[in-house]
Amino acid sequence: MNHKVIAFHYTLRNSKNEILDQSEAAHPFTFLAGSAQIIPGLETELLKLAKGEKKKILVAAERAYGLREESLQVTVPLENLPKDVKVGDQFQAEGKADMPPFTVLDIRESEAVLDANHPLAGMDLTFDVELVELRDATDEEVTHGHAHGLEGHSH
Ligand code: ZN
């Protein structure tokens, strides 16, 4: 397989045109294609662009962070949570730093409803992207499973 390293600038908006996230001007987001570092619906489209090209890419929820699943809501006793917990707070489950955080949906008398859906689940997303770099990955990057910066030298 011909591995690619992609660097791009992006502005991420939801369907209400609100900006959710964007890359920093001096630091395009750089990643190794095929390593599941970005959502599949975006990676597929980036691989079609030429260096310097700009594009508006729409990614439906199914190809972004997935649909919301009601089964990912759990109810836990309030005593298991911090005393000042409020709706909208987010918690990282212990020892699961790679999982999306829980979001507090509701607080009742003695329990709280937590949601383990990704915060962007169920949302159709729009990315305004500019492709900064598209190059072959070095053998070292392929071995490590990540990109070594724009030119492949940093670590
Ligand atoms: Zn490395």
Image: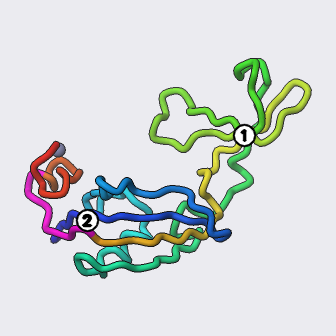
Name above or below for residue 8 compared with residue 98.
below
Q: Position of residue 92 (x, y in %)?
A: 56, 33
Q: Residue at x 60, y 57 (%)?
A: 120
Query: Mark 2 falls on what kind of element?
Result: strand
Name above or below for residue 114 compared with residue 56.
above
Q: Position of residue 137 (x, y in %)?
A: 14, 62
Q: Residues within 10 Å of mark 1 (few under 14, many from 20)?
A: few
The answer to whether the residues at label 2 and label 1 have Cβ atoms under 8 Å apart is: no
Q: Quadrant of ligand 1?
A: top left
Name above or below for residue 75 compared with residue 67.
above
Q: Position of residue 64 (x, y in %)?
A: 52, 65
- Amino acid bearing label 2: Ile
**On the rendered structure, is 32 left or right of 118?**
left
Query: Mark 1 falls on what kind of element?
Result: loop
Q: Residue at x 18, y 57 (%)?
A: 150
Q: Position of residue 15 (x, y in %)?
A: 64, 70
In the picture of the structure, the residue carrying the numbered disc 2 is 6
Magenta segment: does it hold 72? no
Q: Residue at x 28, y 57 (%)?
A: 31
- Amino acid bearing label 1: Gly
Name above or below for residue 121 compared with residue 44.
above
Visual colour scheme: rainbow
In the picture of the structure, the residue carrying the numbered disc 1 is 88
Magenta segment: does it hold 139? yes
What's the magenta region?
Answer: 132-140
Which of the two residues, 145 or 27, is positioned nearer the viewer here?
27
